[in-house]
Image (cartoon, grey):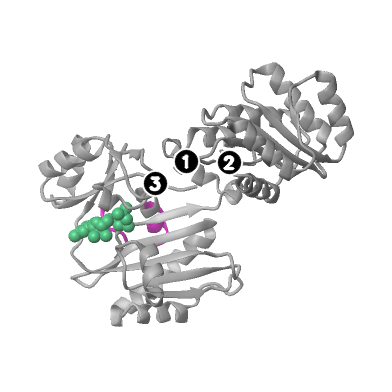
Amino acid sequence: MKIHEFQAKQLFQQFNVPVPRGQVAATAEEAKKIAQDLGGKVVVKAQIHAGGRGKGGGVKLANSPDEAAKVASQIIGMQLITHQTGPQGQKVQRVLIEEQMPIERELYFAILLDNAIGMPILMASAEGGMDIEAVAANTPEKIIRIPVDPATGYQPYQGRQIAFGLGLRGDLLRSAVQLFGALYDLYVSKDCSLVEVNPLVVTTDGRLLPLDAKVTFDDNADFRHKDLVELRDKDEEDPLEVQAHEMGILNYIKLDGNIGCVVNGAGLAMATMDSIKLAGGEPANFLDIGTVNDSERVVNALKIITADPAVKVVLFNIFGGMARVDVIAQGIIDAQKQFNIDVPVVARLAGTNVDEGEALLAAAKVNVIRAKDLGEAAKLAVQAAK
Ligand code: GDP
Ligand code: MN
C-alpha cells in the first residue's frame, strides 16, 4: 500500500524525524489560511501517489498567501500527468502547503528490500532531487548501497559511512546518522517495503531534513497494522483492484492485455503470463485465487475479470494440489448461472479431483474450451482473443 507525502511526513514526525512545517488543504481558502500561518512564503505540492510531480507541474512556489490560494486553485482538481501515472494522469484532490526551505544541496536516501541478498539496504546518493533511476543507469558509482543485517539492525557506523559518502561533516554528519536510524526504525516497525526521501536537503542554515517522503507498506503485514488502514486512499487505486481486495482474492493486478487469467498460485500465475506472451498474446491481469476450496472465490474472480472491458477471453490454469479441481469447476458453473459471461472461456485443469471436475462441467453443459496442457491453453486463448 502506498500513502501520500503528507501522511509519510506525519509518520516521520512520530519517529522523531524533523520535517518542514506544513498542512494539507483541499481548497484554495484552506491553502491561503495555512500559508498565512506559515508566514506567507510556501511550496504548494500536489498529493498523489505517483512521483515526478515537480516536472509535471504539481509542485510550485508561492510567495504570499494570495499567491498560495491561486496556485492551489490551479493544482487542485487538475489531472496531473507524471512518468509514474500513465498517460491518463491522476486527479489531484489535495495539496500540501509547506514553508519554503532555503536549499543548499539535494541528496537522495532510501531504505528498501534487496531481494537478491534478502536484506534491507540503505541507499544514498549525492545526486538527489532528480530521477534516481537515471543516476543508477548512467552513473551507478554515484550510488552508495549498504545492506543492514536484520538480526543486528542499523548500526551507527553504517550511517557514518553513508554520511561521509554524501560529503556531510560535523553536526550534519551527526544529524544524518540519527536520521537514517530513525527511518530504519520506521521501516522495520511499520513493515515497509520502501522508505524514500528524494530530495533529502541540506539547508543554507545548516539543517538536514526530508523535503519529499515516500513510504510503501508490505500488504502481507496488513493484519498487524490496523492503524495504517485509515491511511489508505482508494481514489489512488484501480477500482477493480480495490474490489478484488475486498472480495478476498489473494492477488489481482490489472495489466494492459486482453487475456484474463484465473490461476491458483503465484508461480503458476507467472508461468501462465509467460506462456501467453510466448504464444503471442498479452495478459489482461495477474490473478491468484490462492489455495482455497471455495467456489465463491472463482465466481468473484470471474466477476472482476469480466468487468474489465479489455478482456476478450478468460484462461483458467488450475493445478489442483490441496485445491480441488471439482470445486473450481463448480465455481465456473455457478458463475455462468449467476451472470452472463460473454467472452470465451479456455481451461486447463489438472491435479486433485480432475475427473470429478470434468464430469461436473460435462453434466452442466457449460461452454468451456478444453486444453490438455498450458502450452495448448495459451495458444487457444490467443486464438480466441483475436
Ligand atoms: P516530486 O517531483 O514528486 O519528487 O516532488 P518533490 O517533493 O521531490 O519536489 C520536487 C522539487 O521541488 C524538489 O526537488 C525541489 O527542487 C523543489 N522544492 C520542493 N520544496 C521546495 C522548497 O521548499 N524550496 C525550494 N526552493 N524548492 C523546493
Ligand atoms: Mn521527490
* Residue 27, image quadrant: top left
Q: Which residue is mark 1?
A: 230
Residue 179 makes an appearance in the image: no
Give, as a single range, the part of the protein colored magenta: 10-22
Q: Which residue is mark 3?
A: 49
Q: Nearer the viewer, residue 364 or 41?
A: 364
Q: Which residue is mark 2?
A: 283
Is 20 one of the magenta-colored residues? yes
Secondary structure under tag 3 reads loop
* Quadrant housing the C terminus: top right
Q: Could you tell me residue 337's position as x and y percent?
A: 71, 17
Q: CA distance from mark 2 to mark 1?
A: 32 Å
Dot 1 beta carbon under 8 Å from ligand 1: no
Amino acid type for the residue under numbered disc 1: Glu
Q: Could you tell me residue 359's position as x and y percent?
A: 87, 26
In the rendered structure, which disc, 1 or 3, sits on the residue that comes first in sequence?
A: 3
Secondary structure under tag 2 reads loop
* Residue 124, image quadrant: bottom left
In the rendered structure, which disc, 2 or 1, sits on the residue that comes first in sequence?
A: 1
Q: Nearer the viewer, residue 267 or 9?
A: 267
Is the Cβ of the residue at disc 3 closer than 8 Å to that at disc 2?
A: no
Residue 243 makes an appearance in the image: yes
Q: Tell which quarter ligand 1 is in.
A: bottom left
Q: Nearer the viewer, mark 1 or mark 3?
A: 3
Is 24 one of the magenta-colored residues? no
Q: Which mark is residue 310?
A: none
